[in-house]
Image (spheres, rainbow, N blue to C red):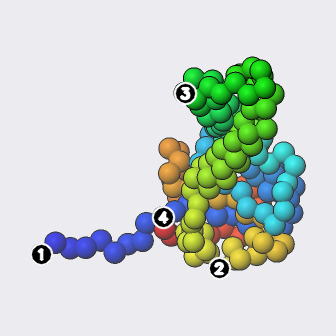
Amino acid sequence: MEAVDNTPETYGVLAEYETPEALLDAAEKAYAAGYRKIDAYSPYPIEGLAEVMGVKKTILPALVLGAGLTGAIGGYLMQYVPSVILYPLNVGARPLNSWPAFIPISFEVAILLAASTAVIGMIALNGLPRPYHPLFNAESFERATQDRFFLCIEADDTQFDSAAVQTFLESTTPISITEVEA
């Protein structure tokens, strides 16, 4: 029978800060030191935090634009094809392709597809729903929604070495440092 390794896997190292300025400074230093799998947690948005962490732009706006254009074209064709090609009816000598009459439905279908894509895309790209996160194992992390600021360097990072990361985070003067198990 094989021996089972019961040692917990490390998710990352979490540092707790008292002020948003300290978190911003630590995130900037971590990015400058070459760490790329970092995440910050705070009770409110901090101006410039995403930029210093190197957060990349999302593909969501392009998806929403594509869905909106697809909806507009699809909505127009949904009216044009039956009215002009399949079942043309000349009522009152009006033109078969009366495009102004097709605009409201085309607009509504565009909005419907764009909004649906925005909601579903946001949920999918954020990895939701996620009822459990390894950081919930850290006792002090519950204060992230109240009055504390946290920076986590994840074990997925190519430069991750637990001892080196803890030494680096100590140089940023946090309140506490916790190694988080997955």
The residue sitting at 52% across, 62% down in the picture is 11
Name the N-terminal-most of marks 1 and 2: 1
Image: 36 above or below 90: below
Q: Which amino acid lies under the numbered mark 2 shown in the image of this protein?
A: Glu
Q: Which residue is mark 4?
A: 10
Per the image, the residue denoted by label 3 is 86
The part of the image, by quadrant, that contains residue 149 is bottom right
Residue type pointed to by label 1: Met
Q: Tags 1 and 2 in contact by the CB under 8 Å rule?
A: no
Q: Which image quarter: residue 57? A: top right
Q: Nearer the viewer, mark 3 or mark 4?
A: 3
Residue at numbered disc 1: 1
Please state if 161 lies on the left or on the right of 20 as rendered. Answer: left
Foreground pick, 2 / 114: 114
Q: Spatial distance from mark 3 to mark 4, Cα to Cα?
A: 64 Å
Q: Are marks 2 and 3 in contact (CB under 8 Å)?
A: no
